[in-house]
Image (cartoon, grey):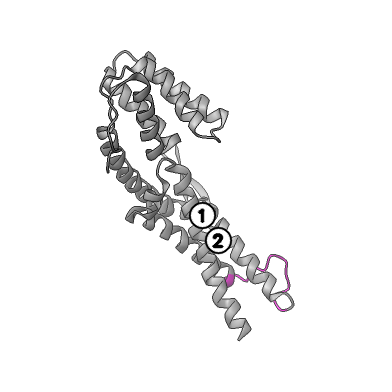
Amino acid sequence: MWDVLIETMSWFGVGFFGMLVGTGELVSRYRDEPGEAVFSKSGAFYIGINVLAAIFALALMRAFDVTFGLDPLAQTTALRWTEVLAAGFSAMAFFRCSLFNVRIANQDIPVGPQIFLETILAAADRAVDRNRGSSRYRLAEDLPIEGLAFEPTSIALPVLCFNLLQNVSPQTQADVRRQIKELTENQQIQELTKIRALLLLLMVVAGERLLQDALALYRADLGLKVPPEGPTI
């Protein structure tokens, strides 16, 4: 009975750890609203691929009797948990590697599970990105930017967002300011478009709700009309 329970927990455990890996990847890539990315259909598909990869990795370990140097008879529980951790957290790294390269027309083509997996994951990732792009578009369209000028806004609003937050790293702040500088120096982009691009850039760091609050506070400081309620998506 105990062995059956351990075996069942192994398969559920490896799937759970695979889910954590997929969720962590989405959260790190879509920082402005990670919940929407994770719970979307495309996000669920992306996470599901990670879960299946972890389960398949565990099946391969069992098929090829990978014991990690442990005695499979004397240390059954330790071996099971080692398999679960290795398959759950390392499956995606393994399946993204290539077995060997084939040179075709002066180009190295990787051969291995990487070809299939990267294609599926890239398609899922693009679908999640498109869904987030639509949501970000609707928010950017509704944010109140009337009466704002790009140059003073590009200086004051980032400072306001960074100070409302407490854990923005110096590297992140430097990256944001570098991108703002590129926007400022680009003379081919219209003023209105620059302001929208600035807000979308800050949304990645501050998130949707905090950006709305920071913008409302900034408009109030300028004596501009502040909408009674934030934009709805």
Camera-nearest residue between 83 and 3: 3
Q: Magenta residues, as a range?
A: 62-73
Q: Which mark is residue 74?
A: none
Quadrant of the rendered image containing residue 66: bottom right
Residue at the (31%, 16%) spot, across then down = 149
Residue at the (48%, 48%) spot, across then down = 25
Which residue is disc 2 drawn over?
A: 88
Residue 2: give x, y in percent of width and height.
Answer: 63, 83
Camera-nearest residue between 179 and 141: 141
Q: Is residue 201 above or below residue 31?
A: above
Residue at the (51%, 62%) spot, across then down = 54
Q: Is residue 34 above or below residue 216?
A: below
Camera-nearest residue between 56 and 45: 45
Residue 164: give x, y in percent of width and height.
Answer: 48, 32
Q: Which mark is residue 21?
A: 1
Q: Main secondary structure of the magenta part?
A: loop
Q: Verify whether residue 70 appears in magenta.
A: yes
Q: Is residue 53 above or below residue 37?
A: below
Which type of secondary structure does the marked residue at label 2 adopt?
helix
Residue 41: give x, y in percent of width and height.
Answer: 32, 56
Q: Residues within 10 Å of mark 1 (few under 14, many from 20)?
A: many
